[in-house]
Amino acid sequence: MLAIKIKQVFLEKNVFSFFANKKKPFKTRAYYLFYSVKGVIIMEKKSGNNLVLPAAIIALSILFVSGMAFWIGMSNESQNSLGSTAPIATATGKLDFASYTEQTAPADSTVLLASTGSAETPRLVTVSGSVTKTISPDKAVIALSVETLDKSASKSQGDNAETAAKVVQAIKDSGIAESDIKTSGYSLNEEFQWNDMTKKSESVGYRTRNSIQVTVKDLAQTGKIIDAASEAGANSIDSVYFSLSNAKESEARVSALKEASANAKEKAQSIAEGLGIAIGKVYSASENSAINLPYYYRSAMDAGAAESSKVTTPIIAGDIELTTTVTVQFEIQ
């Protein structure tokens, strides 16, 4: 009798068809099934019937719901593996499942005249302005070294220290402040040379190298400093490069940024006039700068040439090139 009542209630309330409808969330369908069974039990309790059978029905219902949950989970996994489905957001903001299709993004356009997707996407015109400034350097940086070689490591170090001290003093005597002289590197290594007679590498001694960096603010004295260091014992002039002081470089960068920005704006206005549109406020801006420093190299072999000549080594400072590019995005009105 109870089974007939349950069947009757389920049919009246369309419990079976509701639970089989996969468009409804599984949690909603499970709750509907459970409370439908519970309603029948309450009715039977009020009628004074035994509750053993209803309890068994509840247990079977729970077991049935668990089985359905497992079946639905396996079904979804099978769909995901076979159909390459993935959850995506719909226009209503809810998650749905749709087949995933790989798409290639369109190339960036300099002028974006139409919105792509959202109504709030701005319409933009992107331009770049560039300027190259030629600047005369106001300082030189000399990199030189003192090298010594001896069978004894301690003797090599001692000779190097003595010679390096003479070099530094000669640079000071040439008018360079102590704050503009610094050690840029120091090394002590055992050197080996291949012996064809013994067919093996043999030690030729220990080489000590003391590298010194000198900043020269009076460019006319650059050659004189190199000669003084060479006469005092510096046997490797590694390089000379010309640069800008912090104040002069900052001034040049600010000027270049202003000119590059004005150039970018002029380009945007020209594009707008040609397309019959009007540009509005700046949407974004970025800059990139590169500086080209002139270098002068002198080999270690030439470093001792000043000892046999009274002529000052000619060092001519080249110009420095500063290139600045500004990229700006303007909104289209």
Image: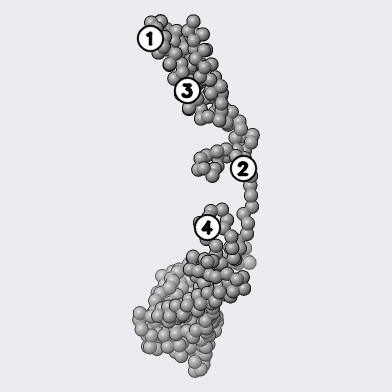
Q: Amino acid at mark 4?
A: Thr
Q: Amino acid at mark 3?
A: Tyr
Q: Secondary structure at mark 1?
A: helix
- Ranked by sequence position, the earlier of labels 2 and 1 is 1
Residue 56 appears at what percent x and percent y?
A: 45, 10
**Quadrant housing residue 84:** top right
Per the model, the C-alpha gap separating discs 3 and 1 is: 21 Å
| Residue mark closest to the camera, 2 vs 3 | 3
Per the model, the C-alpha gap separating discs 2 and 3 is: 33 Å
- Ranked by sequence position, the earlier of labels 4 and 3 is 3
Per the model, the C-alpha gap separating discs 2 and 4 is: 25 Å
Q: Is residue 321 positioned above or below 83 on the image?
A: below
Q: How many residues crowd mark 4 within 10 Å: few (<14), some (14–19), many (20+)?
A: few
Residue at coordinates 54% horizontally, 79% vertically from top-left? 132
Per the model, the C-alpha gap separating discs 4 and 3 is: 45 Å
Please, which residue is most extreme toward the left here? Answer: 178
| Residue mark closest to the camera, 2 vs 4 | 4
Q: Amino acid at mark 1?
A: Lys
Q: Which residue is mark 1?
A: 46
- Ranked by sequence position, the earlier of labels 2 and 3 is 3
Q: Amino acid at mark 2?
A: Tyr
Residue 184 appears at what percent x and percent y?
A: 43, 73
**Quadrant housing residue 16:** top right
Tag 2 and tag 1, C-beta contact below 8 Å: no
Residue 121: mark in rendering: 4
Residue 109 appears at what percent x and percent y?
A: 61, 63
Residue 100: mark in rendering: 2
| Residue mark closest to the camera, 3 vs 1 | 1
Q: Secondary structure at mark 2?
A: loop
Residue at coordinates 47% horizontally, 7% vertically from top-left? 2
| Residue mark closest to the camera, 2 vs 1 | 1
Residue 90 appears at what percent x and percent y?
A: 54, 43
